[in-house]
Each structure stands twice: as C-alpha cells, then as structure tokens.
C-alpha cells in the first residue's frame, strides 16, 4: 500500500454512502471523494419538488457538514472533473483532473451517476430551454420561474411529471408532452399510468400522449413555443426537457472495464477487473430480487439502490464480501400524490386494483404464478409497507382477498 487509500469519483448519493459505510466498518485508509460540481455533496430527489417550490433551502439539500467530513477524515473535493485515469493491474493508479490536479489512489470507486439525455432537435439551444439533473439546473430553473407564464415539459417520466406538478402548483400554465402511449411507461403498469393521467389532467396540467415534437421555436433571446409534428405550436416561455438519462461509463471504458448499459458489476459491486467498485445509477448489476432468473441484470436509478449497493461495496472493500440481495423500492412525489413502488412488476400475469377514491388511495398489486411480486401505491403507505414486507419475507398476499381497499393487506398476509 502506498498510503493513498480509496478514491471515490462522483460525490453522489452512492459516493457519500460508500464513504460513510466504510468508516462505519472500520476502514482506516484515506478516503477522497471527488465531485465535478462546485457544490458540497447534496440530495438530488428534492430538486424537482420541494426545492423548486421553495419549501426547502439549498442548505437543506446538503448531506453532511464539513465538521462531519473532517471528523471522519474524508477529503471532499469540489469542482474537479476527472478526464483520465491511469490504472495498474493491482487496482492502484492516478486520476487526472481537467485542472491539472493529480489524485493518486490505491483503489478506485466509480459513483459517477448518469447525465440527462439530450433532445436532438432544432431550437434546443435557445435561452429558456432547460434540463433538470443537477443543482445548477435547478437553480437556473428556479430563477426563471417567476418571469414565465407558459411552461412545456417534454417527457412523461418521473422527473417530467414531478416538475410539471410542481410548476402547476406554483400557478404556471403547464403542458406535458410524452412521446409514448402512457405516462411513466417504463416504471408502472397501465392502471397506474391511467390514474396519474386522469389526476394530473384534472388538476389542470395539459397532457398530450404520443406527442411528436418536431422543433422548438423562438428568437435569439428566448424560446417561445414547441412545434409538434402536426404543425401545432404550443406557447412556451420555458421548456423543460426530461427524456431519460445516459450512464456515465466513459471513464470506466477508458480503463478497460466491461460496460453495457452502465458499468457491469457482480453481486459485490465489483467491476470486471475484480478490484474497482461501481455503485449507483451507473452500475449494471445482477437482479437482487430473490428468485430472479439467472443472468438477469438491471440498472436502477433510485436512492434506495444507491444506499444499499454502496453498503455492499463497502463490505467488499474491507474484505468481508456480502451479496447484494433485496427488494428494490422507489418513490415519486407529484404535488398531492406520493407514489411508492415496491418490487419489480416485470413478467407479471395478474393485477389487482385497490381503488379508494373516498380516501384518495390507489394501489395496483402485481402477481406472477399466484405470488405477489410488486405494487404501485399512491397515497397508500400501508399497502406499500405490507407488500414490501411480504416480498422480503417470502410471505403471500392472496389475490382473491386483496381487491377490497377497506381490508388492510397486513391482515390477510399469509406467512410462509
């Protein structure tokens, strides 16, 4: 050992959790956490919701105080973008920043996340066309909102809907354009998509599905509208684009790590060289759900995954490897709605809907071969907790008894 310790590139949720977990496990070597943004490590999920609406401050987003980092001997470096890595066979090496600064390391961790996918159409460079992925994006959006009236959000995924709901709540006229046939098509089932569509339309958001955007129009100083393929132009003082993300695999690929829709890792978060770890949005990992098909791989974009996988990576680094196995869960706050998802609904063959309009609760349970595998729960935290617990423990929620929303799922759960 040369005494340089661990270099974590990416001051993301995953990077922060990895550093914190290592110290909790007694890892005593130096830890350096590098971020390319000129901000201390911060939480991202609130950017499209509470922060945009002014319900929390910038300081509320910060993960840890400087005193914490100092006390735990974790060096946090801001505003340094790593552009090249020289790595030796034993996993040690040197990372080179754009500024010219060199960061030697004994071991490397990549928690570099993902970047916003760009929309490649005419007009995307006009002032007032924004993405929402990081703090600078959120600060610019928040600064522009007071001066705009008409907002068009392109993309009906979680970020797009959350931002649209926030802007609508703030009194702006909001149009959401989704190229697919339904909202959040990759993450939830048709029943949940339909519920979200009806709710947000009822609340005043204009939502167009199967919408084909041909170009953005405006003058040199600002965007003024979004033109659709049929020639219709929707007025827009501001356009927010949220059409997915691309994992940041360039550094990993440059040092010979296997990449395929992310950095390919094993169940211990180890990359293909057997030494480097990769965690969070950038990592393509074996499906951690118990009973998942052999060879099934996933790349999660969630806080829960970043935290849990980072803990597994920390165990691998200290020499006590543990497999990453668990039930993934996600959430999305959309103004009055809190959507919580437990498990993965892929491959389901039955759905059970629990709709309680009087109490504003809505859940969809997903089954495969008579067994509960997932649930989408809107304003129904008890349903979410019951399903998550049942899947984790291998218990069962009989579908024949699950459709009555007045019956608590916990009361009909059968322990294996």
Image (tube, rainbow, N blue to C red):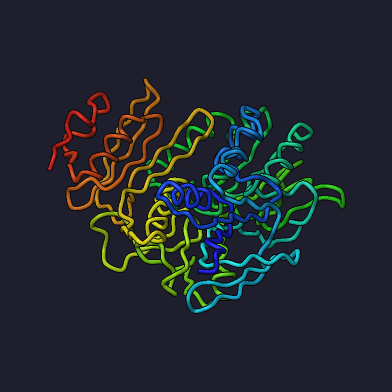
Position of the C terminus by quadrant: top left
Residue 66 x %, y %: 62, 40
Question: Would residue 174 be found to the left or right of residue 74 on screen?
Answer: right
Question: Would residue 62 be found to the left or right of residue 123 on screen?
Answer: left
Q: Residue furthest right?
A: 220
Q: Residue furthest top?
A: 358
Q: Is residue 189 above or below residue 356?
A: below
Question: Would residue 96 be found to the left or right of residue 280 on screen?
Answer: right
Count of number-bearing discs: 0
Question: Would residue 261 be found to the left or right of residue 217 on screen?
Answer: left
Residue 286 x %, y %: 35, 63
The residue located at (72%, 57%) in the rendering is 215
**26 or 334: nearer the viewer:** 26
**Does the image show residue 2?**
yes
**302 or 63: nearer the viewer:** 63
The residue located at (74%, 60%) in the rendering is 122
**Does the image show residue 206?**
no
Residue 155 x %, y %: 58, 49
Residue 270 x %, y %: 41, 66
């Amino acid at each position: 050992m040369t005494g340089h310790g661990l270099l974590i590139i990416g001051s993301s949720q995953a990077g922060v959790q990895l550093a914190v977990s290592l110290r909790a496990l007694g890892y005593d070597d130096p830890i350096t956490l590098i971020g390319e943004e000129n901000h201390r490590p911060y939480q991202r999920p609130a950017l499209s919701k509470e922060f945009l609406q002014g319900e929390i401050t910038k300081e509320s987003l910060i993960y840890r105080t400087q005193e914490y980092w100092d006390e735990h001997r974790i060096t946090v470096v801001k505003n340094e973008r790593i552009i090249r890595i020289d790595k030796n066979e034993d996993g040690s090496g040197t990372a080179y920043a754009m500024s010219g600064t060199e960061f030697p390391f004994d071991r490397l961790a990549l928690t570099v996340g993902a970047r916003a996918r760009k929309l490649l159409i005419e007009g995307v460079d006009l002032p007032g066309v924004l993405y929402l992925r990081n703090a600078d994006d959120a600060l610019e959006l928040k600064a522009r909102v007071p001066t705009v009236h008409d907002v068009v959000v392109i993309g009906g995924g979680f970020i797009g809907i959350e931002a649209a709901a926030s802007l609508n709540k703030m009194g702006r006229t909001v149009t959401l354009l989704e190229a697919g046939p339904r909202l959040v098509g990759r993450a939830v089932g048709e029943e949940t998509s339909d519920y979200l569509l009806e709710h947000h339309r009822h609340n005043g958001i204009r939502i167009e599905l199967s919408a084909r955007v041909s170009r953005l129009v405006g003058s040199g100083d600002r965007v003024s509208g979004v033109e659709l393929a049929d020639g219709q132009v929707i007025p827009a003082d501001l356009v927010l684009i949220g059409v997915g993300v691309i994992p940041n695999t360039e550094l990993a690929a440059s040092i010979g790590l296997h990449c395929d829709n992310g950095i390919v890792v094993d169940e211990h978060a180890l990359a293909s060289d057997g030494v480097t770890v990769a965690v969070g949005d950038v990592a393509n990992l074996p499906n951690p759900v118990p009973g998942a098909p052999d060879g099934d791989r996933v790349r999660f974009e969630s806080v829960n995954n970043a935290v849990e996988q980072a803990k597994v990576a920390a165990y691998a680094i200290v020499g006590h490897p543990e497999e990453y196995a668990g039930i993934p869960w996600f959430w999305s706050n959309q103004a009055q709605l809190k959507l919580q998802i437990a498990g993965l609904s892929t491959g389901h063959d039955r759905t059970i809907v629990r709709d309680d309009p009087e109490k504003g609760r809505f859940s969809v349970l997903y089954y495969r071969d008579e067994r509960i595998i997932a649930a989408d729960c809107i304003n129904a935290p008890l349903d979410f907790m019951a399903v998550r617990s049942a899947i984790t423990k291998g218990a069962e929620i009989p579908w024949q008894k699950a459709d009555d929303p007045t019956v608590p799922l916990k009361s009909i759960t059968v322990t294996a």
